[in-house]
Structure formats: C-alpha cells, structure tokens
Amino acid sequence: MSAIITDNRLFDIQEKLNNGERLSIQDGLHLYETPDLLGVAQLANQVNLKKNGNHVYFIENMYINPTNVCEANCGFCGFKRKPGQDGAYTMHEEELLEYVSKRWNDGIQEFHIVGGHNNEVPFDYYLDTIRTLKKHYPQVTVKAYTGAEIEFFSRISGLSMKEVLQELIKAGLDTMPGGGAEILTERYRAKMSPDKASTDQWLEAHEIAHGLGLKTHATMLYGSIENTEERLIHMDRVRQLQDRTNGFMVFIPLAMQPRSVKANLKRRTSAYDDMRTIAISRLMLDNFAHVKAYWINIGVQLTQMALSFGSSDIHGTLIEERISHSVGALTSSGITRDELIHLIKSANKIPVERDTFYNIIKEY
C-alpha cells in the first residue's frame, strides 16, 4: 500500500501514525504543502479504516432555523436579517409546528436547530422552541444552539453559560451542533465574526456542555481569510478540549460558500482543498471517532470521494437547508434516504443509518 506514496516526508508521518504518536502543527503544514495529495489520502483512509472499517454513517434529520433576525455582522453570512428588514422572520409555536408538520416523516431522528442571534425576543423564546418540539415530537433528538448562541443567550438573559445550558437541558436539549466555531483564532474572529463568541468562549460553552453530560459536535468553516496554520490551530484547540472531556462526537469541516449564487466561482474552495482538508482533519484529530463530509457544501460527488479521504459520515437528509443556500450553495437543499444509501454504496462502502449519538439503526 505505501508504495504509492511519492513524498518521502510522508513516510515519517506514517511512522508517527503507526506508532500512535500525535501529529504536530508542523506535520499538518507539510500535509497541506505536499504535492502528494493521494499519499495524504492514503494515510487518512488507513486511519479511518482502523477506526470505522467500511462503515459510513448518515441520519434522517430535519433542519430548522426558527429565526433569521440577528444582531451579529459576520463577513460570511447571507442568512441574517435586521429587525423589520424584508425577509426577516421569527417563528412562534404555531408557525414552528406548521413548518415541521409539512416536512415530517416517521423516519426523522433529529431536529437540527440553529438560527440568528435575535435579541428582539427573550431567552424564554429559545427555551419554548425546544419545549414545543419535545411536547409534540418527544421521540426526536433535539440538537440545538451553537456555542456562539449559548454565549449570546448568556448576555441577553444575565445567566452564566452553565445556567443557560442547564435551563436548555431542562427544556429538552439533547445535544449541541458544532457551528459558531468558524476559525478558532482571534485574528480571524476580529475580522469575520467580531460580534460573536470569542475562541475561548466557544470552547468554554462546549466544555461546560460536556461537563453537564451533553455530547456535542465541532465544525471548522474554512476557505476565506484564514491561512493553513490557523486551520491547524483550530484543529489543535478542539483536539485539546477533546483530550479533557471526550465530549465531541464528530468534526465537520465546512467549505465557505460565496455570498451569492452569481458570485465568481473562483471564490469557492477547490476540490483539492476540500479533499485535502478532510484528510488532514482525519489525521490531526486522532481523538475524534468521526470526520464528516458535509454534502451540502461540497456536493454529492466530492462527498463520495471524501469516503476515501478519511470521512466516515455524510450527515443527513436535512429536508430543507437554508443557511448555506442563502450564500450560494449549489447543492439541493435536501436529499432522500435512498439517495444517501446509493451515494455510499456506489463508493463501495457500507451505509449505516444512525441516530444522533452514532447508535446504529440499520445497516444497508
């Protein structure tokens, strides 16, 4: 197998991996710089096969954005609206239930909920959103509110982040999504998301959640102003938190989308960058069980390729995704279970339908 590696320095990295040694940021920089992309892919594939075999996981889920009103001004967002602006909305109980009922099927395992930082409504609004869903769909896992939203709720409620999370758990919160992380360096956040949680606050929100018994997710939004070292610093920071808590279930690299469908395509990440970043994520994050290829961002064909670059999860059906599509994602906004199964099988992998916590529902 190793005969196809053409960069001799990759053999040193392979030896570290075989000996169970953690890769350094310097190792990661070489993985980004080497022209031997297939060698990097091979190393990542070997690591993933040891962890997950040929299993590839997916979930039947529904994406819900209760409000797009937001106080923040992130440089990458096309989803947010100001209060009173055309297109601004905030779903209340009746609208929320109508939205879900129109898209409901009995296979749905998870509600994936993120939205704007809407300070026109109180913290109770966000609690009531969860309570309403739990009341009408008690069997469905509620994955709601990013680490950045937790910090925002703390500010508008006067509660500590721990108290915010305790109230959300009482309301029915089961897990947190990984969004709001963007790139976990202050240089990046000062330019791209100056109004949102800092690096330390995002990490703290997840550390508190883990301490309260929640398993959560971690993302990385790459492809804008960050450099490769910042991507690796981001990976190292979530890796260090995982060392302390073992609370993350999966790492999700998210490719930046342009601000408009009509935007110059050169602003999109390249296929090479997408595949390399997924592979490097798998190699750097030795203490994560899964690295996800997010088909909404990179499309179904690159998602299939990612299954040979270290990915063991392709996310879910979503039903209707809004945030990536508001900034120019060219993929469909939803996909069926049969399409996901076909996608995995045609990549010579074994499709595994899972719940939120990677418990197996069915192997296909």
Image: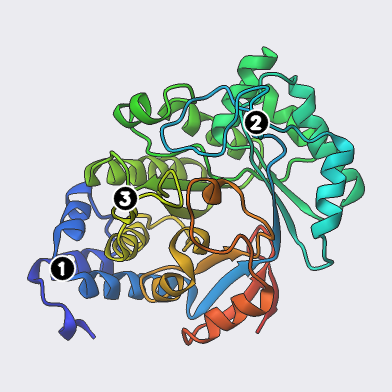
Observer-nearest of 122 and 173? 122
Residue 327: image location, x then y, percent: 49, 46
Identify which amino acid the numbered label 2 is placed on.
Asp
Q: Residues within 10 Å of mark 2 (few under 14, many from 20)?
A: few
* Image vertical order of residue 30 relative to residue 15, above or below: above
Identify which amino acid the numbered label 3 is placed on.
Arg
Q: Earlier in the sequence, mark 1 or mark 3?
A: 1
Left-right relation of 201 to 37: right
Extreme top residue here? Answer: 158
Quadrant position of residue 8 = bottom left
Residue 234: image location, x then y, percent: 35, 41
Residue at 16% x, 78% y: name it: 5
Left-right relation of 236 to 35: right
Extreme left residue here? Answer: 8
Q: CA distance from mark 2 to mark 3?
A: 27 Å
Residue at 42% x, 55% y: name it: 287
Residue on which the image places disc 3: 267
Observer-nearest of 80 and 312? 80
Residue on which the image places disc 2: 86
Identify which amino acid the numbered label 1 is placed on.
Leu
Q: Are marks 1 and 3 in contact (CB under 8 Å)?
A: no
Residue on which the image places disc 1: 10
Q: Are marks 2 and 3 in contact (CB under 8 Å)?
A: no
Circle 3 SS class: helix
Residue 150: image location, x then y, percent: 61, 29
Residue 339: image location, x then y, percent: 62, 78
Q: Nearer the viewer, mark 1 or mark 3?
A: 3
Q: Earlier in the sequence, mark 1 or mark 2?
A: 1
Q: Residues within 10 Å of mark 1 (few under 14, many from 20)?
A: many
